[in-house]
Image (cartoon, helix red, strand yellow):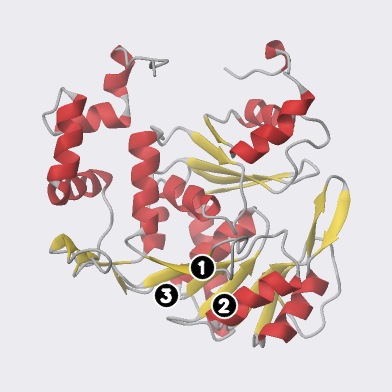
Amino acid sequence: MEPVWYPDARAQETWLGRFMAELGFQDYEAFHRYSVEEAEAFYHAFFTRLGVPWRAPYTRVVEGHFPFPRFFVGGRLNLVEACLRHDPTRPALVHETADGHVRSLTYGEARREGERLAGGLRALGVGRGDRVGLWLPMGLEAALALLAVAHLGGIAVPIFSGYGAEAAALRLKDAEAKLLIVQDGFLRRGRRVELLPEARKARAMAGTEKVAVVRRLGLPLEEEADLAALAGPLSPPEEMESMDPFMLIYTSGTTGRPKGTVHYHAGFPLKAALDLALLFDLREEDRLFWFTDLGWMMGPWAILGGLILGATVFLYDGAPDHPGPDRLWRMVAAHRLTHLGLSPTLVRALIPFGEAPVEAHDLS
């Protein structure tokens, strides 16, 4: 197999190039061997360079062996502080809805909104170790809810926004979720999709204690709480151990019963940041858009990894081909997106539309 591109002088200015130089490496193969053979030193060097705000430093990067190693032994932190520690005036999250409405939050605004939401969730009884279902399309509320649950030391259970009641209930029941946060609905290809009726069915099937609602379609509430109206005392993020869980994310269930995977405060989020830095060269001035859903791994991966690196994370809750097959390119141009992630399934779905003219959108 022939390489399609060889690094040129610009490679020295990438995240990877600068990190290699700081460690004294000029040869990539030697650097790669170091990362494998001296993993303890490699990961310590990277996360020191990243400036993760530990409340208590770890004594070792890894202890023990597969299948039950422990990472960042003795370290204490909360992933929210790693995500929202950046210049409060810089853009953190940008959301475009299916009908083209754009909202955004700076890092300072995201921190304040996340704290406010965490206070409201605490008033609903959410605390350390409680599981909270997040049945939300990709938007500001999805990102803030993920952060707010982690803020409290709770465990988020993301649920694909396209699921029906039965699939959602299976995950809520298995996780023993105390609360479900759901958006009442959203637009998809110009049509209303109402989630709240499905959430009521799922709650009954799973026995979930409480439901809080993000109101987008204005559906009337019954026993549910209005998420926007929740209020409670503000408090700093809970101090967590490195291996304390923050997320329980489920497999799709296409080949059997869905299986919940446990992720930790100093696991998934830090690895997402490493991936985006060294493999994608995502920097503070960049804008990342991964076409996905909060219920798939890549949703939390993009949100948390992008925020830890101080970049801007772009969120979209609509279809990739509405109102036309060039919707993605329109958003890339309009929001000056630098990083675009797509699944092979999405690419195959767009192939029948043919190629868009290069000059149609400014992709510079």
Image location of residue 107, percent across then percent down: 48, 50
Q: Are marks 3 and 2 in contact (CB under 8 Å)?
A: no
Q: From the image, state whether disc 3 or disc 2 is nearer to you.
A: 3
**Mark 3 and mark 2: span between their CA atoms?**
11 Å
Image location of residue 273, percent across then percent down: 37, 47
Does residue 147 appear to the left or right of 189 in the view shown? left
**Total numbered badges shown on the rendered structure:** 3
**Residue 230 shows in the view:** no
Residue 153: numbered disc? 3
- Of 185 and 107, nearer the camera is 185
**Residue 133 shows in the view:** yes
Crowd tier of the residue under label 3, counting other residues whose Cα lies within 10 Å: few below 14, some 14–19, many 20 or above: many
* Quarter of the image that includes the C terminus: top right
In the image, residue 262 above or below residue 36: below
**Mark 3 and mark 1: span between their CA atoms?**
9 Å
Residue type highlighted by circle 2: Leu
- Of 179 and 291, nearer the camera is 291
Q: Are marks 1 and 2 in contact (CB under 8 Å)?
A: yes
Image location of residue 190, percent across then percent down: 87, 46
Q: Which residue is mark 2?
A: 121
* Quarter of the image that includes the N terminus: top left
Q: Dividing the picture into quarters, in which one does residue 53 lie?
A: bottom left
Residue 94: numbered disc? none
In the image, residue 164 above or below residue 31: below
Dot 1: what SS?
Answer: helix
Image location of residue 259, percent across then percent down: 52, 69
Q: Which residue is mark 1?
A: 148
Residue at point 39%, 71% (across, down):
245
- Of 126 and 192, nearer the camera is 192
N-terminal of the two: label 1 or label 2? 2
